[in-house]
Image (tube, rainbow, N blue to C red):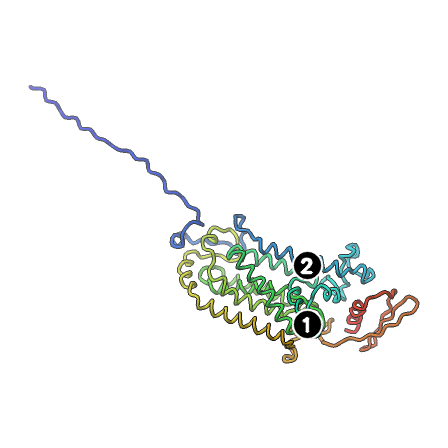
């Protein structure tokens, strides 16, 4: 049998290395790719981001307010001007006026006048319009400072991480200015500050951001409750002496309108990655909502309304309009007639000096007080007279 050669079968197998797909950061994903991702529920008050997104603009505003308050206390100098009749005397020049004079632990009425608070006589008679710009920097007292800045930090930091420093900074300054302008139309002849107007602007803008991006956020009811609680607490605090509630109203309105103009679109990539913020996000709905919110009609309408509002208030201020003449009950929005009088009357007192003592007698109700010193400034005498007559 002849030998037959069996052909050998050769099999060639090419082995190619398969590279795994590159994983990208969620901030680099497009909006369409984010839709395919799982919905990521965040806690309502979650830990804030420690990434590259900073909160520098809110930090700058807080530092400026702290500097302004310390400066007001230095100028007030309760230890020297009130002859050591102060609260927390160990603080020396930084000690506070008595609680009967300033229940918020702060400077006196004359001290607030000196550092730039709003007052009817200075705007109507002396036309010191610069007080509209200085009043938003001032707080009525330590309690007012703590409550206001705590609320600003809580609301502002989250908004800044979600919408960016420039937009939130613009809303903050616009609300502060608009609040001061509106407050100038409802002034009484007593000093008032308008620092809370910027806070109410942030609250208004957060509400408009929630309304605009309704489908993006979850836990909407809880968010509204938090906003209303902060708003009502600070509004009630505004009924205390030296805080102007009309600035809060003006700041809220301007912030609400400015929110529709500027906060029309959250940063989807960043908020997917972010670990901090007030609202929870529903990422699946974000892309479709973006298409709807990119229509500029709502932004244009709100911008026009805001522009007419600011222009109208400025014109009324330049014409020295006193809105209290047209609204007799409006003063109770800014004051509660309990211990502190809401009447806009000039208090008059008679002084008599004898044996290194000064006797101060109120001409309105006959009350008097004897002071063991005589070197009292005219502004300080007015403070004591208003306190005794009211």
Q: Image check: 200 left or right of 87?
A: left
- In this view, the residue in front, 181 or 267, is 181
Query: Marks 1 and 2, how far apart in space?
Result: 23 Å
What residue lies at 66% left-to-right and 75% top-to-bottom? Answer: 331
* Count of number-bearing discs: 2
Residue 235 seen anywhere in this rendered image of the structure = yes
Q: Residue at x 71, y 69 (%)?
A: 191
Coordinates of residue 290 in the picture (x, y in percent): 42, 60
Q: Is residue 253 left or right of residue 283?
A: right
Assign a secondary structure to mark 2: helix
Pick whichever of labels 1 and 2 is earlier in the sequence.
Answer: 2
Q: Position of residue 347 (x, y in %)?
A: 78, 75
The residue labelled by disc 2 is 68
Residue 314's place in the image compared with 17, above or below, is below
Q: Which quarter of the rendered picture does the N terminus lie within?
A: top left
Query: Which of the two marks, 1 or 2, is nearer to us in this view?
Result: 1
Question: Residue, x 68% and y 59% (percent of image)?
Answer: 68
Question: Please, is residue 293 above or below residue 60 in the view?
Answer: below
**Residue identifier under label 1:** 127
């Amino acid at each position: 049998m002849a030998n037959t050669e069996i052909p050998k079968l050769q099999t060639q197998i090419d082995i190619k290395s398969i590279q795994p797909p590159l994983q990208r950061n969620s901030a680099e994903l497009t909006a369409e790719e984010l839709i395919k991702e799982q919905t990521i529920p965040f806690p309502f008050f979650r830990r804030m981001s420690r990434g590259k997104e900073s909160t520098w603009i809110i930090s700058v505003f807080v530092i400026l307010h702290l500097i302004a308050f310390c400066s007001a206390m230095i100028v007030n100098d309760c230890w020297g001007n009130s002859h050591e009749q102060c609260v927390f005397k160990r603080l020396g020049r930084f000690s506070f006026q008595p609680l009967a004079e300033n229940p918020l632990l702060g400077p006196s009425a004359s001290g607030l006048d000196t550092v730039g608070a709003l007052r009817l006589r200075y705007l109507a008679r002396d036309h010191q319009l610069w007080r509209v710009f200085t009043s938003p920097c001032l707080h009525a007292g330590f309690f007012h400072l703590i409550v206001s800045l705590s609320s600003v930090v809580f609301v502002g930091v989250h908004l800044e991480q979600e919408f960016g420093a420039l937009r939130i900074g613009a809303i903050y300054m616009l609300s502060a200015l608009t609040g001061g302008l509106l407050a100038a139309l409802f002034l009484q002849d007593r000093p008032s500050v308008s620092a809370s107007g910027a806070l109410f602007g942030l609250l208004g803008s957060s509400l408009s951001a929630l309304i605009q991006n309704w489908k993006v956020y979850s836990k909407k009811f809880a968010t509204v409750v938090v906003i209303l609680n902060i708003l009502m607490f600070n509004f009630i605090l505004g009924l205390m002496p030296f805080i102007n509630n009309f600035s809060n109203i003006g700041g809220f309105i301007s912030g609400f309108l400015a929110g529709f103009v500027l906060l029309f679109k959250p940063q989807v990539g960043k908020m997917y990655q972010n670990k901090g913020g007030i609202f929870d996000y529903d990422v699946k709905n974000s892309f479709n909502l973006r298409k709807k919110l990119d229509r500029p009609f709502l932004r244009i309408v709100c911008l026009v309304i805001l522009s007419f509002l600011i222009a109208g208030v400025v014109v009324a201020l330049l014409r020295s309009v006193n809105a209290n003449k047209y609204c007799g009950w409006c003063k109770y929005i800014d004051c509660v007639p309990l211990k502190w009088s809401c009447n806009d009357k000039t208090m008059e007192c008679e002084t008599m000096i004898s044996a290194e003592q000064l006797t101060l007698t109120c001409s309105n109700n006959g009350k008097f007080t004897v002071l063991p010193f005589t070197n009292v400034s005219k502004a300080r005498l007015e403070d004591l007279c208003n306190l005794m007559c009211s």
